Image: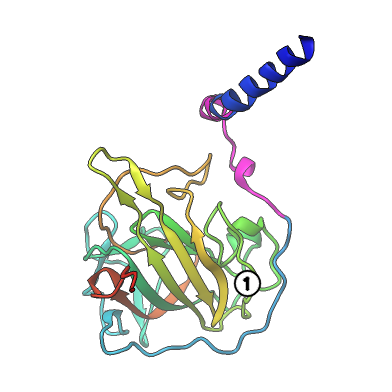
Amino acid sequence: MKKFTGILIILWAMVHMPACAQDMDNEREWEPEDTEFYEPVPPVVEAEGGFMDPPSDAIILFDGSDFSAWQSANGDEVDWMLDEGEMTVMPGSGNIVTRDGFGSIQLYLEWKTPTEIDGDGQGRGNSGVFLQRRYEVQVLDSYENETYVNGMAGSIYKQYAPLVNAARPPGEWQTYNIIYEAPEFDDNDELVSPAYLTVFWNGVMIHNRTEVKGDTEYIGPADYSVHGNDGIMLQDHGDLVSFRNIWVRELDESPVWGHEGF
């Protein structure tokens, strides 16, 4: 009888522990370091390729000539620097976001961190690419620069480290080619399907249809908030990070996207 009672107690605990754990997570006081991890460290790989011209069906977001496809995150004009076909963060001016919103897309862009190294860890060439203003692929100088691995370049920030570190030295142009599948919500604002990210960094796959846990959070665990199509946002984190050759392809507009075939 005691053995049977013990089994019932264990079964009850197994059923109720997840809810209890979730309640504890909601009640705890989170610190930034609670969602940072340092191991395992992604191995370093050398990657020379990755540069792409836009295909004929691409929407050009930045060709080096102007900021016509962009606005500041608060709706004003862009105050970033524009020079020789590239845009560079104007520290303190704020994030910028595309004027148009998007759903599922292929996003391609080129970026570089400053040649002159100033700082270390998260304070070195920091920026970010936010899909639908919420889900961040980190931009950082990760060439011989240690930090928490789910915050290094190529990470889905504070969620997943990249499979490898394909960083080039400071001042060299690098590429992201991102396949983004937007989340879906039902009429009751419940999550039906999460977001997924596939990312190539300098031509090397670093995320393979990785399930996004929710909105990017600096403090505390990620969780979803209901939303529709939204813009692509580039972050002003106070560093002179530059971007060029930015374009997207709208996957939702493809007649075969999501088609299961025979």
Quarter of the image where the N terminus is located: top right
User: In this view of the protein, can residue 172 be seen by the observer?
Assistant: yes
Q: Position of residue 43 (x, y in %)?
A: 72, 71
150 or 236: nearer the viewer: 150
State left or right for residue 192 relative to residue 51. Answer: left
Which image quadrant for residue 243?
bottom left
Q: Is residue 30 magenta?
A: yes
Question: Is residue 144 left or right of 167 when viewed as pictured?
Answer: right
Looking at the image, residue 224 lies above or below residue 38: above
Residue 89 visible within the image: no
Main SS of the magenta part reads helix
On screen, residue 74 above or below 203: above
Quadrant in the picture for residue 130:
bottom left
Q: Where are the magenta residues, as a range?
A: 21-38
Q: Which residue corresponds to mark 1?
A: 117
The secondary element bearing badge 1 is classed as loop
Taking the spot 56% from the left edge, 62% from the top edge, the residue there is 155
* Quarter of the rendering occupied by the C terminus: bottom left
Q: How many marks?
A: 1
In the rendered image, residue 2, in percent from the top left (x then y), is placed at: 78, 10
Amino acid at the residue labelled 1: Ile
Relative to 49, residue 150 above or below: above
